[in-house]
Each structure stands twice: as structure tokens, then as C-alpha cells.
Image: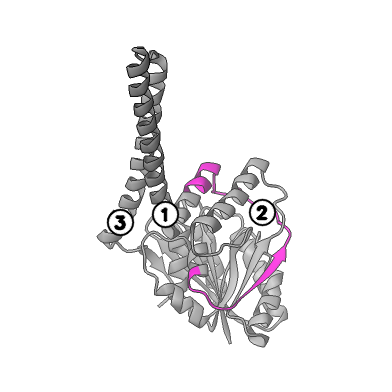
């Protein structure tokens, strides 16, 4: 039974060799037949050169190199498309996804009625507190506004059957959010917990604002609740405006005292203008996604590969 291990890489020249050594150690001990598919996502360092060097001495190492940086989601999709294994694993190259869990994960699929064995972190040691706080809030918001369920601390690290991998490949949308897609396809899933692990080497390419943008992408991809927010705001402020108009008319009729307050008027105008722009921004985000989908551009472009 062949295991395909998909590994997206972006500027990871320091970690690819370390990752390969750990996989050899883990899979060699279990006599596992495997292939590693490194997906070079437009790196501008020596990541591709290091992968090629590994591939010359090990025929189990495959690689795909994009023409530019398309993002991790595209890299995952490309790896799934090119994988041939009966089981497919998705891992990060920085070894924050412990390879020693692979054997246990595979056993759950082979010996129990599971189609996916996924992992989640039970702690965020080593991460900035503000980043951890917003990460937890994202999962809470996502589970409230969407019909899919995201497990707090869920990682992309998982092992799945060929059937699950093929189901993911049927979802050919351009704007991809893999955690949501894994949940959307369903199937029996087993969750394994582990403590947070620091990177083996190098620095992460994810900035705080990059993660915020990624979170927004996930909410927009799997929920239309933000569209309802603008409608709710409109209803609330229409009611408030009607009440104030009635109040002003009655006050003027009874007391002949026009309402004073230039400052309050400006503040109200600014508030309503901000809400209108916020609502237009929400609509624009959904329109942007629709626009990109209708173009039907390829999810990725390959510059070179050693996969037939």
C-alpha cells in the first residue's frame, strides 16, 4: 500500500533535508512504501535546488515547481492531483507536524472505520499571545456563521484515503480554503491531539496580517452571514431614524424648539457613512470572489517537475 506525502514548500531551504531524514527514519522503521511530493511554491531561495539534490539520490522523492508563488492552497491541490498513493498525507515541511504520528494515523485508517485521521494542537506554546487569541476567536466565529464545523487548533496535517483525496479534487474552485474543504466533504474523521512544536529551522512565511487575510478568505468561502450583517444594520438604523424623525416632529410641534446640535449631526452622518462603506466592502469581497471564479484561471502553473 503506497503512502503519498504532500509537502508544500515556500522558502524552506533549511528544512527540506531535515524533513526528508525524519520521514526516512519513520517510514523505514515501519517498512512503509511511500513517496514524497515536494511542491515548490515559487520559492526565491535554494529550496528547489535542495529538493532536486535529494531527488537524484532517492527515486521516492518527487517534486513540482510552480512558475510563481500561487499559495499553499494551490500547492496542496497540485500535490493531491499528482499523488498516486492509496493513502495520502498532507504535512508541513517545518516539522511542526510530527512525523512520528504517521504510523498511528495510518493504523487508525487501516484497522478502524475512519477515512481521515487529522491532527489538532491542544496548546499554542511559543506563539505570540495576540496571535493565539485571534486564532481561537476565528474558530468560534467560523463555527457560528458557517454550516461546517472547524475544530479549534486543527492543522492541515492529516492522512486520508484515496477516496477522500479524489473527493477534494472534485472541488475545483479557484478560491480555496483547505480546512473548510476537508470538513465540507465529510467522511469519518478521527482527531489526534498533540502539543505545539517549534519549527525545526528557518522562519515562518506567515505574518499576522497574512493570517488575518486568510481567516477572512475562510469566512467568505463558507458563509454568507457577512452579507446579512449589512441588511441587519440597514434595518436597525432605519428603525432608529424613523423613531428620531417622529421625536423631532413632535418636539417641534409641542415646543416650537428646533433640535440643536451640529456636532451630533456630523457624528451620525459619519457613523452611517462608515456603516455604508463597510457594507459595500462586504458586497465587494463576495463580488471579487465571484469575479475570480468566472475567469476560470488554472489553480496553478507548473514550471518543472520530475513526475510523468
Which type of secondary structure does the marked residue at label 1 adopt? loop
Which type of secondary structure does the marked residue at label 3 adopt? helix
**Outermost residue toward the front?**
254
Boundaries of the magenta span: 184-213
143 drawn magenta: no
Mark 2 or mark 1: which comes first in sequence?
1
Residue position for label 2? 199
Q: Distance between the residues labelled 3 and 2?
A: 36 Å
Residue at image location 58% in from the left, 55% down from the top: 139
Between 45 and 185, the residue placed more toward the observer is 185
Residue at image location 65% in from the left, 61% down from the top: 95
- On screen, residue 32 versus residue 164, left or right, reads right
- On screen, residue 34 versus residue 178, left or right, reads right
Residue position for label 3? 290
Q: Quadrant of residue 264?
A: top left
Q: How far apart are marks 2 and 1 (CA)?
A: 22 Å
Q: Position of residue 102 (x, y in %)?
A: 67, 74
Residue at image location 67% in from the left, 77% down from the top: 27
Between 148 and 305, the residue placed more toward the observer is 148
Above-or-below relation of 245 to 253: below
Eye-nearest disc, 3 or 1: 3
Mark 3 nearby-residue class (10 Å; few <14, some 14–19, many ≥20): few
Mark 2 nearby-residue class (10 Å; few <14, some 14–19, many ≥20): some
Residue position for label 1? 69
Amino acid at each position: 500500500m503506497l503512502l503519498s506525502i504532500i509537502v508544500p514548500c515556500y522558502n524552506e531551504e533549511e528544512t527540506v533535508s531535515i524533513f526528508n531524514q525524519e520521514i526516512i527514519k519513520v517510514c523505514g522503521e515501519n517498512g512503509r512504501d511511500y513517496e514524497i511530493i515536494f511542491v515548490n511554491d515559487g520559492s526565491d531561495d535554494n529550496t528547489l535546488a535542495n529538493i532536486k539534490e535529494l531527488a537524484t539520490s532517492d527515486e521516492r522523492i518527487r517534486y513540482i515547481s510552480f512558475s510563481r508563488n500561487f499559495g499553499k492552497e494551490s500547492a496542496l491541490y497540485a500535490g493531491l492531483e499528482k499523488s498516486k498513493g492509496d493513502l495520502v498525507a498532507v504535512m508541513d515541511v517545518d516539522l511542526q507536524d510530527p512525523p512520528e504520528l504517521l504510523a498511528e494515523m495510518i493504523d487508525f485508517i487501516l484497522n478502524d472505520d475512519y477515512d481521515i485521521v487529522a491532527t489538532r494542537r491542544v496548546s499554542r506554546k511559543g506563539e505570540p499571545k495576540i496571535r493565539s487569541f485571534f486564532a481561537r476567536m476565528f474558530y468560534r466565529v467560523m463555527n457560528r456563521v458557517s454550516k461546517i464545523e472547524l475544530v479549534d487548533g486543527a492543522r492541515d496535517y492529516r492522512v486520508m484515503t484515496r477516496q477522500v483525496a479524489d473527493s477534494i479534487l472534485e472541488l475545483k474552485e479557484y478560491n480555496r480554503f483547505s480546512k473548510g474543504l476537508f470538513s465540507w466533504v465529510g467522511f469519518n474523521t478521527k482527531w489526534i491531539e498533540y502539543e505545539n512544536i517549534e519549527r525545526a529551522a528557518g522562519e515562518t512565511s506567515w505574518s499576522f496580517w497574512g493570517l488575518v487575510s486568510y481567516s477572512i478568505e475562510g469566512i467568505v468561502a463558507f458563509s454568507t452571514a457577512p452579507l446579512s450583517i449589512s441588511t441587519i444594520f440597514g434595518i436597525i438604523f432605519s428603525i432608529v431614524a424613523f423613531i428620531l424623525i417622529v421625536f423631532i416632529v413632535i418636539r417641534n410641534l409641542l415646543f416650537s424648539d428646533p433640535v440643536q446640535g451640529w456636532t451630533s449631526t456630523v457624528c451620525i452622518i459619519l457613523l452611517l457613512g462608515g456603516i455604508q462603506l463597510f457594507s459595500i466592502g462586504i458586497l465587494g469581497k463576495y463580488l471579487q470572489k465571484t469575479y475570480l471564479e468566472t475567469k476560470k484561471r488554472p489553480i496553478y502553473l507548473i514550471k518543472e517537475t520530475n513526475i510523468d
